[in-house]
Amino acid sequence: MNFSKYIGLPYKNKGRNFNGVDCYGIVYLIYKEEKNINLPDFSDINYCSTWFKDNKNKENHILDNLYRVWNISNSIDKPYNSFDVMLFYSSPTKEVVNHCGLYIGDNKFISIQEQGAATSAISRFSGYWESKLYKAIRYKGDVK
């Protein structure tokens, strides 16, 4: 599968289309475009781009919302499948899962971060990112 049309999208808090995405937005957009699956967009969640720094807002925690559509009772083990979602700790303390990306095969995933270039990119799932992995999850419709 060619994911090149998703590279270089700008960061936009709560973005869910080609005009801009956040880390869940890239997952949402790819599922919609490539699998014709309309995931919840979670637009009803009131959060700002720094919500993860305040661990008191548990209702904003990524895991508190994803359970509705993802198989997250157990981690998905390697080998990962394309369209598995990688959940990451971004903070050094590993207290809050606050980033996600979409596994695209060949030990790579696509994601977007607010820092730096603030555009979507493909990264290798090794080293830094592998050390930050909380767990991989699979859409319930894809669980065999």
Image: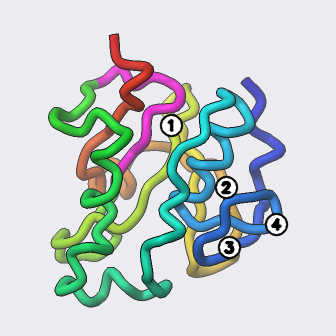
Q: Which residue is mark 1?
A: 103
- The stretch drawn in magenta includes residue 123: no
Earlier sequence position, callout 2 versus callout 3: 3
Q: Are marks 2 and 3 in contact (CB under 8 Å)?
A: no
Residue tagged 2:
121
Disc 4: CA contacts within 10 A as few (<14), some (14-19) or many (>=20): few
Residues packed near mark 1 inside 10 Å, few (<14), some (14 to 19) or many (20 plus): many
Residue 132 picture location, percent across and down? 29, 58
Q: Which mark is residue 11?
A: 3
111 on left or right of 55: right
First-in-chain label (3 vs 1): 3
| Quadrant of the image occupied by residue 17 | bottom right
Magenta span: predominant SS is loop
Cα distance, mark 2 to mark 3? 11 Å
Residue 99 vs 109, above or below: the answer is below
Q: Amino acid at mark 4?
A: Asn
Instruction: State the SS at label 4.
Output: loop
Q: Secondary structure at mark 3?
A: loop
Considering the image in quadrants, where does the N terminus appear?
Answer: top right
In the figure, 76 relative to 12: above or below? above
Query: From the viewer's perspective, is the residue at label 4 or at label 1 nearer?
Result: 4
Q: Which residue is mark 4?
A: 19
Magenta-drawn segment: 78-87
For badge 1, the amino acid type reads: Tyr
Query: Marks 2 and 1, Cα distance to the nearest angstrom?
Result: 12 Å
- Residue at the (41%, 31%) spot, across then down: 139
